[in-house]
Image (cartoon, helix red, strand yellow):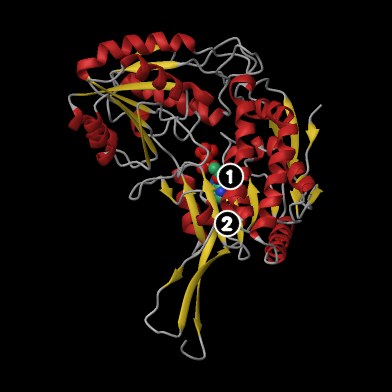
Amino acid sequence: MPTDLKLFIAGEWTEGTGDDHYEVHSPVTGEHIYNVPKASQADIDRAVSAAREAVEEMRHWTAFERAEVCLRVYDLWQHRAEEVARILTLEQGKPYHEEALGDIEESADYFQIAAEDVKRLSGEVLPTTERNRRMFTVHRPVGVWAAITPWNFPVMIPMEYLGPGLATGNALIVKPPEFTSWALLEVGKVFEEAGVPKGAISIIPGAGDIGTQLVTHPGVDAVGFTGSSATGAKIVSMMGLKRSIMEMSGNGPTIVTSDADIIKAAEAAVYGAYYNAGQVCVATERLIVLDEVHDQFVEAAMKAAEEVRLGDPFDENTNMGPLNNEPTAQKMDRHMADAVARGAEVLMGGKRASGYPTDLYYEFTIIDKVPEESAVSQEESFGPVLPILSARDDEDAIGVANRTRLGLQAAVFTNDLTKAFYYADRIRSGTVIVNDSTDTWETFQPFGGAAGTDTGWGRQRIHEFTDLQTIVFSLREEL
Ligand code: ADP
């Protein structure tokens, strides 16, 4: 029996006033697992006006009081982690033991870190040209945020906005995709229990049209978006002059240089390609191997791939589950067909796996001799594929890495310190990882796209959720 979910609006659980709902099926089992109401314009208006009231209410709170609420969220969360992680696996497909549980636990950390940060968030006292003038800055909340989030990390990504956003006195309306909204709605119960002011966090699942209604709403001051560059571009054209953090697609290049630790590089690359079935914006999307070490690398990668165990994501032995949805699987099909047509060589996988309850289980794939112009190299594949491209030398490798419109997280394997800096200086990427997977992650890492790319701007750090106000004070008399 599917569960009937409710929306979390203005601190209340509601069916909303719309007359429609979404039916959601599990990528793991294919079953109809829940229904979630489709919000009406009136529901969205209500969330926005409650959010505005919450911002007003929190104006009277100190940073320490806001930190207190965030820490309560963090504490209460710990007791619910297993339950929420189970739902996450069922709706998203990621392996429960290997990923979902850790994912949910780590998601709570955003509230703990924000609680610590906000207590130390200070302004400046600035020198002035006039003797009787005093000038200082304070961090004000931005106001009401619409956070439009994707389906690959349905709980963690919203928390990147909610933790620092709430700690700094903002109100946020999160819109997860309707088909990965259950786990997040469960977390809504934690917000309620922790005493988050009514309306400071609302959760309204839905498709793109609900997102559009939110980002264009005159009562919304700022937009946080994590998703594809194509959708991000539409949002930017619609939202007008609102503040924003835009975190969009990556095409994670990993370069394996001639002096790299090949085994380590191969293991890290395989991990970066299969973790969350490759549905990660920092996944290892392109492997650029110097000709000199190509054969050695391919052998090591084939060996490392023996560790990938596709299967039922609730099984303890599984470390790769199904893809989340059919459009993503179709993109993989398209990228594979295109690469093969252009002469790439399939070393393993390359197709959907048979014998599973849904058609979304995809074999772990390694393809070699991938031409640079193929779709799997140019676009974000978002699937479990490791495409190997070759480079003659370091200069050539940098050229291949940078010939893309995307620049989120890159990796380079080298044991030569000078070479590591040479690559870090030249690769156009928000983050460059040396000697580890592109999928390397720290909760408090300043994370986002390099300027000049289609990956976006902003870092989900506490300052980005505040507006710096300057106060200039004129004393009546000179001291
Ligand atoms: P993906 O391609 O990975 O599904 P998208 O960028 O399409 O990612 O989606 C990311 C988020 O943006 C989701 O919450 C989705 O519902 C939302 N979204 C999609 N289209 C629009 C739109 N036109 N306006 C606002 N939000 C949108």
Compared to 313, does 114 lie above or below? below
Nearest the viewer among 91 and 337 is: 91
- What secondary structure is marked by label 2? helix
Residue 209 shows in the view: no
- Report whether 62 appears left or right of 323: right
Ligand 1 quadrant?
Answer: top right
Q: Which residue is mark 1?
A: 113
Circle 2 packing at 10 Å, graded few (<14), some (14-19), many (20+), is many
- What secondary structure is marked by label 1? helix
Compared to 171, does 229 lie above or below? above
Tell me the residue at 31%/39% (across/down).
404
* Nearer to us: label 2 or label 1: 1
State the mark number for residue 215.
2
Q: Is disc 2's CB within 8 Å of ligand 1? A: yes
Compared to 379, does 14 lie above or below? below
State the mark number for residue 385.
none
